[in-house]
Amino acid sequence: MNISVSQAQGSVPVAVIKLEGKLDGQNYQELIAKAQELYNAGTRNFLLDLSDLTYISSAGLVALQSVALLSRGEQIPDTDYGWSTYRSLHSSQASLQRNLKLLNPRPEIINVLDMVGFGSIFETFTDLDKAVKSFS
């Protein structure tokens, strides 16, 4: 997976993290580390551009939830504990995320997100400008 970052400015600054390839157990911690780096540098709003993400595994779902927790200033659970981490993250995230949004996920990614209940947690956009302007 390739990760690239750009900055966008709406009413607040937004880090646009573009993911290319597969987000799985081999690389999900790279996304968490990149988000942690950005958060430590002051970023509070994240837009994940998923237009070139072709696959997401359960580990990738843990990464999405970890970034959501991070964007809210919460502690990220130890991802080495696998499913127990996923369950704790999912149970703590019943409401729509305000600081992490998704851009252009492919239909196969949308299907996975909807299957696990993340479709109601992450606001999804098809237009970059509208997505950036949605952050407040």
Image (tube, rainbow, N blue to C red):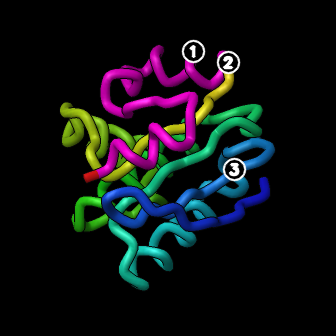
First-in-chain label (3 vs 2): 3
Checking the image for residue 132, the label placed there is: none
Is 113 covered by the magenta stretch?
yes
How would you rate the neighbour count of disc 3 (Cα within 10 Å): few for under 14, some for 14-19, many for 20 or more?
A: many
Q: Secondary structure at mark 2?
A: helix
- At horizontal 52% and vertical 61% (from top left) the residue drawn is 8
How would you rate the neighbour count of disc 2 (Cα within 10 Å): few for under 14, some for 14-19, many for 20 or more?
A: few
* Res 44 → quadrant: bottom left
Judging by the rendered image, the residue that carries numbered circle 3 is: 19
- Does residue 60 appear left or right of residue 84 in this picture? right
**Near-viewer residue (121 or 17):** 17
Residue 101 drawn above or below residue 94: below
Q: Indicate the amino acid at tag 3.
A: Leu
Judging by the rendered image, the residue that carries numbered circle 1 is: 111
Residue 118 drawn above or below residue 133: above
Is 108 covered by the magenta stretch?
yes
Magenta highlight range: 107-135
Residue 69 position within the rendered picture, expressed as x and y whole percent measured from the top left: 30, 56
Q: Indicate the amino acid at tag 1.
A: Asn
Judging by the rendered image, the residue that carries numbered circle 2 is: 108
- At horizontal 56% and vertical 57% (from top left) the residue drawn is 16
Q: Secondary structure at mark 3?
A: strand
* Res 4 → quadrant: bottom right
Residue 7 drawn above or below residue 62: below
Q: CA distance from mark 1 to mark 2?
A: 5 Å
Residue 40 drawn above or below residue 23: below
